[in-house]
Image (cartoon, rainbow, N blue to C red):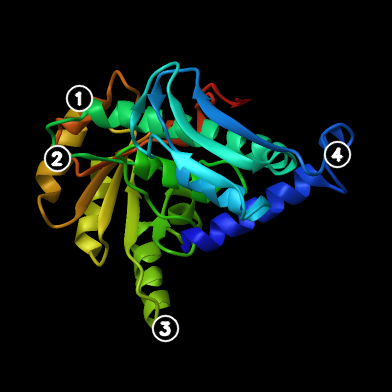
Amino acid sequence: MDLQQELDIIIKNAMREDLGDGDHSSLSCVPSVAVGKAKLLVKEDGIIAGVDAAKKVFDYVDPNLKIETFIDDGASVKIGDIVFHVEGSSLSILKAERLVLNIMQRMSAVATKTDFYVDIVKGLKTKILDTRKTTPGIRALEKWAVKIGGGENHRFGLYDMVMLKDNHLDFAGGITKAINKTIEYLEVNNLDLRIEVEARDLGEVKEIMEVGGVHRIMLDNFSYDDTRTAVKLIGDKFETESSGGITEKTLRNYAECGVDFISIGALTHSVSSMDLSLKAI
């Protein structure tokens, strides 16, 4: 994924959606020559994210806007903190305001939740992964926020990693057929992609190991005991990942089972936007 290219697409589409044929609220009462200054005010504790994205939005709207940054992406913030000042055309600031806030509120919420989960497994080898359970059209922003919060990205989409889950296995005629067909497909199409296979029980873990040719085994909805058994069985032959309904209450217990990764959809699909505002000064 080219993050900058994705960001350009997101900003362009969002401005098209919001601006239409003009910001008539501003154009009707703010002089075209007016200049102003505004501050990004934090109204909720958390991890700030989206500062660099906001700069891109301001630059897209008006390259002459000047940004003075006080707090960078990934920093802990508290109520009352000022993240940056933006100065220049009042019409330009007003035009960019909502998109800047939408992006930063969402990204900061994702980064804050990710930081919370990462802290739970502190001191263990397990790494926290996101999923594809993202908001359509802004996946790049949400996955960027996960990284800012200290997590790691799983695959970005369907194209950059092979992930054989329950439906793939069933439609393909079973685990062995699915893996063998996948390996053949990648060879025929000259594709260098990692392969992950979901296991629903210990029997499927053993079958995946017997077939081989994969990089990671996902332990889906396993109990703690079965997870420990699977990790011991797999050893260092394949990477291991726990997934399926893992919450803040169960996260460290699964990590202590020794898995390499834990994927959590809630990092992106179950967050409430951080309270931020852009205020004229």
Say which residue label 1 marks.
Answer: 253
As measured in the structure, the alpha-carbon distance from the residue carrying label 4 to the one carrying label 2 is: 55 Å
Kind of residue at disc 1:
Asn
Among numbered discs 1 and 4, the one appearing first in the sequence:
4
Name the mark nearer the viewer: 3 or 2. Answer: 2
As measured in the structure, the alpha-carbon distance from the residue carrying label 1 to the one carrying label 3 is: 42 Å
Does the residue at mark 1 contact the one at mark 3 (Cβ under 8 Å)? Answer: no
Kind of residue at disc 3:
Val
**Residue at image point 14% right, 40% down:** 125
Name the mark nearer the viewer: 3 or 4. Answer: 4
**Disc 4 packing (10 Å; few <14; some 14–19; many ≥20):** few
Among numbered discs 1 and 3, the one appearing first in the sequence:
3
**Disc 3 packing (10 Å; few <14; some 14–19; many ≥20):** few
Name the mark nearer the viewer: 1 or 4. Answer: 4
Q: Which mark is residue 145?
A: none
Say which residue label 2 marks.
Answer: 125
Instruction: Give coordinates of residue 87: x percent, y percent.
Output: 59, 40
Q: Which mark is residue 27?
A: 4
